[in-house]
Image (cartoon, grey):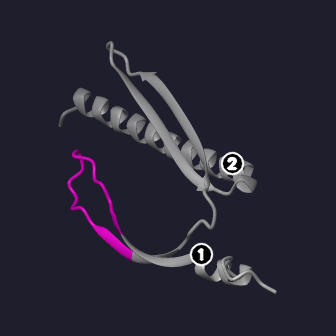
Amino acid sequence: MSDPTRPDQSDLATRSVMQVARTYRHRVRKTQHSEQDSDNDVIEVHRFVTRPAMVKVAIGGTFSMDNFESVRYDVSFEVPCYREEMEETYDFALGLANERFQTEVDDTRDFVMRSRSQAKHPF
């Protein structure tokens, strides 16, 4: 006989997914002359049946830009998961952080190089 106080396990998987509408707003650096745009979509979000574990990954670095200037980047992600998924979630979060960190560093390097070349040759 089933316990009426406990939910049916087959029903948990069905009820643990919900649809959420979200809007993405794309930030544009002040140095660019383009308008801000946004996208709308609906995603499926998994609700946790139990209290989730949290995996946090943080990457940071300070880079010299010459002339006594430097820039610092800190990127972190905190991702909820089940305890049984922590290793996989860590690898996922680390990949996201590495990718975002490298993108920010590359964008800044490109911006600095363009700025320096324009300062040397303004016309």
Q: Which residues are magenta?
A: 23-40
The main secondary structure of the magenta stretch is loop
Q: Amino acid at mark 1?
A: Ser
Label 2: how many residues lie within 10 Å, few (<14), some (14-19) or many (20+)? few
User: From the image, which quarter does the C terminus lie in?
Assistant: top left
Q: Is residue 24 magenta?
A: yes
Q: Nearer the viewer, mark 2 or mark 1?
A: 1
Quarter that holds the N terminus: bottom right
User: What residue is shown at x 50% (from left), y 41% (from top)?
Assistant: 76
Identify residue for label 2.
Answer: 91
- Mark 2–mark 1 CB contact (< 8 Å): no
Residue that extends furthest to the bottom in the rendered view of this protein? 1
Name the residue beneath numbered marker 1.
16
Q: Amino acid at mark 2?
A: Asp
Using a 10 Å C-alpha cutoff, classify the residue at mark 1 as few (fewer than 14 neighbours), some (14 to 19) or many (20 or more). Answer: few
Residue drawn at x 73%, y 79% is: 9
